Image (cartoon, helix red, strand yellow):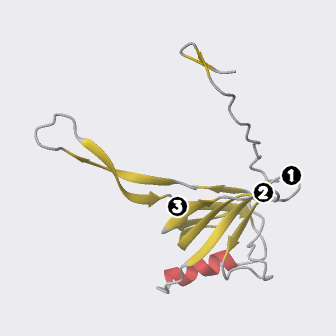
């Protein structure tokens, strides 16, 4: 039991944690095999949703009121080992050439049994940065390429468990 200021409260529900090591990246129209998956990624970051804070005063109040403003979403950063697929680079090149090529996609979190446990959907994404691998003949490290996506919207999707 949890005690708060000397009072007993109900036990809190338990939520199983999922490791972040199994995930997929899906980007509409970039997959080469029709699955939606664009490859195995080493790292995904930037799944950020925040709001501007708008302050205003009412009458002669000394403290301003703070209300939520427009939502702002972080850039999604993807890192993966270099493969023979140039799909991510070619998407970036189309943007460089002035083509409007916005795409939707998902980051899908999987458990150890490869069942979907979480999903973040992004919308209206386009690559603002591509970084090729560092090439070093003396290194035994994996060659990594990186892609940074600007997104118009990001949402966490609730995954319903079967039978619940």
Q: Position of residue 65 (x, y in %)?
A: 26, 42
Q: Earlier in the sequence, mark 1 or mark 2?
A: 1
The alpha-carbon separation of the residues under discs 3 and 2 comes to 29 Å
- The image quadrant of residue 30 is bottom right
In this view, the residue farthest toward the right is: 113
- Which numbered marker is on residue 112? 1
Q: Quadrant of the C terminus?
A: bottom right
The one nearer the camera, 8 or 158, is 8
The alpha-carbon separation of the residues under discs 1 and 3 comes to 28 Å
Q: Position of residue 52 (x, y in %)?
A: 36, 53
Residue placed at 70% from the left, 78% from the top?
86
Residue placed at 41% from the left, 53% from the top?
51
The alpha-carbon separation of the residues under discs 1 and 2 comes to 15 Å
Write down the residue under mark 2. 161
Left or right: 60 with respect to 134?
Answer: left
Left or right: 111 with respect to 96?
Answer: right
In this view, the residue farthest toward the left is: 60
The one nearer the camera, 24 or 144, is 24
Callout 2 crowding tier (Cα within 10 Å): few <14, some 14–19, many ≥20: few
Q: Quadrant of the N terminus?
A: top right
Write down the residue under mark 3. 75
Residue placed at 77% from the left, 46% from the top?
19
Image marks 3 and 2: residues in contact by CB distance under 8 Å: no
Left or right: 7 with respect to 97?
Answer: right
Callout 1 crowding tier (Cα within 10 Å): few <14, some 14–19, many ≥20: few
Nearer the observer: mark 1 or 3; the answer is: 1
Q: Position of residue 89 (x, y in %)?
A: 64, 76
Q: Position of residue 129 (x, y in %)?
A: 54, 68
Left or right: 41 with respect to 47?
Answer: right
């Amino acid at each position: 039991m949890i005690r708060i200021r000397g009072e007993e409260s109900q036990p809190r529900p338990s939520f199983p944690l999922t490791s972040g090591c199994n995930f997929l990246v899906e980007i509409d129209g970039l997959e080469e095999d029709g699955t939606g998956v664009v490859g195995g990624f080493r790292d995904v970051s930037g799944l950020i949703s925040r709001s501007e804070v708008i302050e205003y005063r009412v009458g002669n109040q000394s403290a301003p009121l703070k209300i939520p403003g427009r939502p702002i979403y972080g850039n999604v950063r993807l890192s993966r080992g270099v493969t023979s697929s140039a799909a991510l680079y070619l998407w970036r090149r189309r943007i460089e050439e002035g083509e409007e090529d916005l795409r939707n996609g998902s980051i899908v979190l999987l458990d150890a049994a490869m069942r979907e446990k979480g999903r973040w959907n992004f919308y209206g994404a386009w690559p603002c940065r591509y970084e090729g691998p560092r090439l070093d003949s003396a290194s035994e490290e994996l060659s990594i390429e990186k892609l940074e996506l600007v997104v118009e919207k990001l949402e966490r999707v609730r995954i319903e468990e079967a039978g619940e």
